[in-house]
Image (cartoon, rainbow, N blue to C red):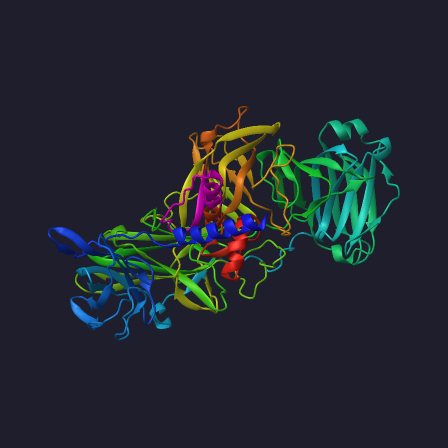
Amino acid sequence: MSDRVRRLAGVLTVLALVLTGLGAPAVSASARPAQGDGVELVKLVDLKVERKPEPVGIDLDRPRFSWIISTTARDVRQESYRVRITTGGDVVWDSGVVESDRSFDVEYGGPVLKSTTGYEWTVDVVTTAGEASGSSQFRTGLITAADWGGSRWIGAQPPSRDPLVGWDNYTAEFDFTIDHVAFGAFVRAPNPNNALMWQVSVDGGVPRLRPHRRVNGNYTLLANPGIDISSAVTVNQLTTQSNKLSVTVGPGTDPSSVHVVTRINGIEVESRNVTQAGTMQRGFIGFRSDFASGQPERSRAHAVKVTRTEDSQVLADIDFSTGYNPFSGGTVVNGSLELVGTVNTVLAPAPAAAPLLRKEFAVNGPVRNATYYVAAGGYADVSLNGSPVSDAMLSPGFTDYDDSVQYAAFDVTDRLVEGPNAIGMELGREFFSMTGGNVWNWERPTWRDEPMARGVLHIEYADGSTERVVTDDSWTYREGPTRFDDLYAGERYDARFAVPGWNSARFDDSAWGVPRIAAGPRGVLVNQRQQPVRVTRSFPAVGITEPAPGVYVVEFPNVIAGMVEYTVQGPAGTTIRAAHAEKLLANGRVNMSNNGGFQAGFQTDYFTLAGTGEPETWMPKFSYKGFKYIEVTGWPGDDPPPLSAFTAKRVNTDAEQTGRFEASNGTLTGVHEIVVNTLYNNIHHIPTDTPMFEKNGVSDNGTVAVYRAVA
């Protein structure tokens, strides 16, 4: 990029920030404008508290007020202002007439505000063109720790602290086909660097079993060049049909050894005692592929099943024809897991599904006001009487949980009904309880725990009495249909686990469990200052290609940060896989290259159908991706999916764009649009660095931020 273009881009970026970052002026409903000869000269618009119109949840000692003078006259200046705060008709603070042109960040100077209280405020201004007044309102939040009294942190019961329990003596059955050189499988693998790796090879035109022991990343071939298994299977069979590699592992002759029996297509081909296997007394299964003579090994796994020896319990039963891939490596294509080149992936027990939490309560009279305050370790998707309390997503915002924890506040006055009501919360992991490893080690920050939430519903009745509904051990809990969520990896949603009516009153939750009562994060609870993250634009799919049989690449108009809404009809258990990317490879498939070391996968969603006989619609709620394309596999039926099955949703902090830039030079207009889109793609509660890869916060200065937006 030339210096001239950089300078121009920098100017456009600053302009984009100005046009994007300001709220659009809105006339106060109760503004009283100055008039002259029947024509409005001055009026007050865009009345805000802490930069928000009519906010709910203000918990600052000295909130700040602002307004904008709108006038058709020229050279109008404010000469003085007066701010008054009232509640229930009583004056709480009167600034008096202040001779000043200040109309923003006017600080409250009265007594301590009460928690969970509605306040009205009025501002009167005198300008060189006349006088004007405006009124608005705000509601306070939970200002002190005592205001949360009686509420507890609740969430899912924690998973087993030892994930290897039960993974000792078992039979692993791998259905596979070799496309080039070899197929490799891990057993007794606590991790990919310590495992038994059993390889079936057709190198040199001879079918061989090549057993390996891997300790701390170093392989030892236990039979060189391998065991000839041509009496059990031919090269033609291994390369043209599905075969079954069965590996049974059990106790060896001493505590540091493992006994292994191997069968191919039901025929025993070897039984051996593997020594020096002390790190492999328990472990999962997985897949391994690499390069041979400079060429990538290629194979396909069709299914894998693991059965424990002692009680025949099925530890894993994975059919890749559904499109589901619980491994971080390999790609499901045409119902099989493709293993090409370097792949080292081990199945770990799935983390707990997103918890559903619910509470029924009664409303005993007309309600004047009701506000729900909710903090979360992770995300809390809140519903009341079966409907979302807000259009906010990925809420509350991310913080350093050892320092502060944000809570959101929602006005739910109109959502309550006299009689039985129900609150529902589904919790997502966010950075608080990520399970997949990555180069930033988000799977093990100091605050890491399972998802949890803390909430207070404050009800003010028409007669002046109040009532609180709080999170505690009276709530009920079960796992929901979001079986997995990870900000980097994506989500797995299985509609067969959906619970109709769970967040509505009179639902039978007698079979539900009791939530965990947790200590909660160490940080101080504070109201979310920034605007919420919302769906701000929708984009229809504009094209679809089929670069390989059964592989569909769907294109959208722009690179966005967000997710896709899917509408699919098919049999129960059908799983649609969608991998998201900003670019394509030369072969027309999506480019999933990354440097984040994402052990739980990367930007891929899975949607498993309930098979209702009707179109089923789903959109992820606990992750977002950076993408222009999605690669779809597992689509039901023989026909390609229609474009109408996919709608891209851009999500970002809802900072309103209040201006436009257009030049006679189309390139300049285009650069400005790119800069604005880039900024939107990188604000999700905090400024972030790339929506596809890092999603991490940045703290650089404005100059660097300008460069980042256009570089």
> In which quarter of the view is residue 335 placed?
top right
Q: Residue at x 49, y 44 (%)?
A: 671
Left or right, 576 with reference to 218:
left
Q: How many numbered marks, from 0 up?
A: 0
Q: In the image, residue 23 lies at what x, y percent?
A: 34, 53
Q: In the image, residue 639 lies at what x, y percent?
A: 53, 24
What is the span of residues highlighted in magenta in the rendered image? 648-674
Question: Which residue ends up furthest to the top in the rendered image?
Answer: 638
Question: Which residue ends up furthest to the right in the rendered image?
Answer: 224
> In which quarter of the view is residue 305 placed?
top right
Q: Based on the picture, tell me whether residue 442 belongs to the magenta stretch.
A: no
Left or right, 536 with reference to 704:
left
Question: Which residue ends up furthest to the left in the rendered image?
Answer: 37
**Residue nearest the observer in this picture, 389 or 661:** 661
Q: In the image, residue 203 lies at what x, y percent?
A: 83, 35
**Residue nearest the observer in this picture, 442 or 215:** 442
**Residue nearest the observer in this picture, 477 or 437:** 437
Q: Based on the picture, tell me whether residue 652 belongs to the magenta stretch.
A: yes
Left or right, 685 with reference to 459:
right
Q: Residue at x 22, y 67 (%)?
A: 81
Q: In the image, residue 699 lies at what x, y percent?
A: 52, 62
430, above or below 101, in the image: above
Residue 641 visible in the current orientation: yes
Residue 569 visible in the current orientation: no
**Residue nearest the observer in this picture, 492 or 267:** 492
